[in-house]
Each structure stands twice: as structure tokens, then as C-alpha cells.
Image: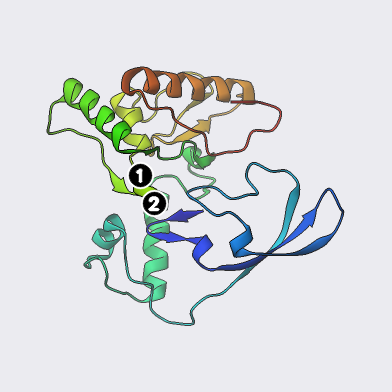
Amino acid sequence: VGAYGQEVSSTIASVLVLDRESGQVGPMEASQCGFGYRSSRFKGDSRFLVLAVEFILDPSDESAPVAYAQLADALEVETGERVPLSVARETVLDLRRSKSMVLDPDDPDSVSAGSFFTNPLLDLAGMAELNARAEELFGPDNLPPAYPAPEGMAKTSAAWLIERAGFSRGFGEGPIGLSHNHTLAIVNRGGGTTAELVSFARLIAGHVEEVFGVALKPEPVFVGHSW
């Protein structure tokens, strides 16, 4: 879990888990948790049930250095600067609310599982192929974002791909649709079933792959359904 340049994995010391195979309860060090981009060993393995999490935090009235450009712009500071912790917190919450990513009974678009798709990680050849397709479709001045990722990979924007594939915010006429404030959020507007939601997500992912050759991966773990 992470946003705006911060990851919980950087402050987790250990996780208390129940081993469903042995019935034993015990701690698991952060190094054993397999933390990665939007992932951990708990995501694809139902063996362990998380009971508690121990964090190690730095006692300070100031935030960590602001690393995310959008957050820096909202705070009106340069990246790398620090701000009062309370100011950083409220600004992050305001940014998340603007994208309907904070649960709000008065905001129907906030009823979602958050970002449904992870941002794709591509190797150099995959990124070059994506850029070539984008340039052919939109010209050289409208290429997808690319951010450095571990092991020589590049991370691009799932939202960019979805929107350029023809799915605008608010897309969907039935009970399932995209949020009006965030392309990555799939919203149940009322009365929709899980099967309908998964079908809607497959429609989007399938068209993105057809247009750009990039396979989107869902972030939520499915129960009773497969991707």
C-alpha cells in the first residue's frame, strides 16, 4: 500500500500472523513479507491471516521529504522539502477526496476498492513498443508516462492507457462504471453484482491490451471469481 511517494512497507517492522495450516500464531519480519509494488506474500497466498502490524515511525512534527510532484504542487513547495506533518496529512486527504478515494457517504464515487488496476511494469522493449504504438496513434508529443522501477523496469500509467483506449471518467451505463473522478476506480452504483463488475473490468483490460499491447492486472484479490 502506498501513495504520494510513501509506502507502508518502509515503516513496517513485523506482522503478526496466524498460519492457517499449522494453527500457530507468530511474528513475521518485514523481510519475510515479500513486499513489492502493490504486492506482498499475503496477496496471493491464503495460508497466513494478518492479525496485527507493528510499525516503526520517526517521531517528528515534520513530514518526510515530499517526493511526489502532485503533492509538492498542492503544498506549494519544491520536491525534497519538508512541511508540518499535520499540513501534509490534510493535503494528502484533500487530494484523495478530490479523486473520490476517501469513503464519503455523500460521494457515490467513493464506493470502490480504490485503484482497480496496478500501473504496468514494462521492460525496455515493452516500453519501446508502447511508445511506438502511442506515437502512431497520437503523435510524438503524447507519449505515456514512464517512471523508473527496480531491475531496469519502467512503470507506466494504467489511467493514461485506459483513457487513451477510449474509456473516459464516468464510463458505463449500468450499475457498474468508472468513477467520475478517477479512471482507475470501478464503482458499483447500486444493485451491481460481482460478476458484472469483473466483466466490466475485463472489457476495459481487453480493449487496452488490443490497442496498446499491455495487459492490465487487477489489484483486488477475487473471492469466488477468477480473472
Question: Can you give x and y, in whole percent of width and height, for residue 18 in the image?
Answer: 79, 56
Question: Can you give x and y, in whole percent of width and height, for residue 169 in the image?
Answer: 36, 31
Say few, some or many: other residues with alpha carbon within 10 Å of mark 2 (under 14 / 14 to 19 / 20 or more). few
Residue 65 appears in which quarter of the rendering?
bottom left
Q: Is residue 63 above or below residue 151?
A: below
Which amino acid does the dot numbered 2 rest on? Pro
Q: Is residue 124 visible from the viewing direction of this image?
A: yes
Q: Nearer the viewer, residue 191 or 227?
A: 227
Give the numbered dot on residue 150: 2
Q: Is residue 177 above or below residue 76?
A: above
Q: Nearer the viewer, residue 183 or 22?
A: 22
Marks 2 and 1, Cα distance to the nearest angstrom?
Answer: 6 Å
Label 2 residue SS: helix
Question: Can you give x and y, in whole percent of width and height, for residue 81 in the image?
Answer: 27, 72
Residue 74 appears in which quarter of the rendering?
bottom left
Q: How is the image coloured?
A: rainbow
Q: Are marks 2 and 1 in contact (CB under 8 Å)?
A: yes
Say few, some or many: other residues with alpha carbon within 10 Å of mark 1 (under 14 / 14 to 19 / 20 or more). some
| Residue for point 40% across, 74% down | 85
Which amino acid does the dot numbered 1 rest on? Met
| Residue for point 54% across, 47% down | 39
Q: Is residue 172 visible from the viewing direction of this image?
A: no
Give the numbered dot on residue 136: none
Q: Which residue does the numbered mark 1 point to in the structure image?
A: 153
Question: Can you give x and y, in whole percent of width and height, for residue 167 in the image?
Answer: 35, 24
101 horizontally vs 32: left or right:
left
- Total numbered labels: 2
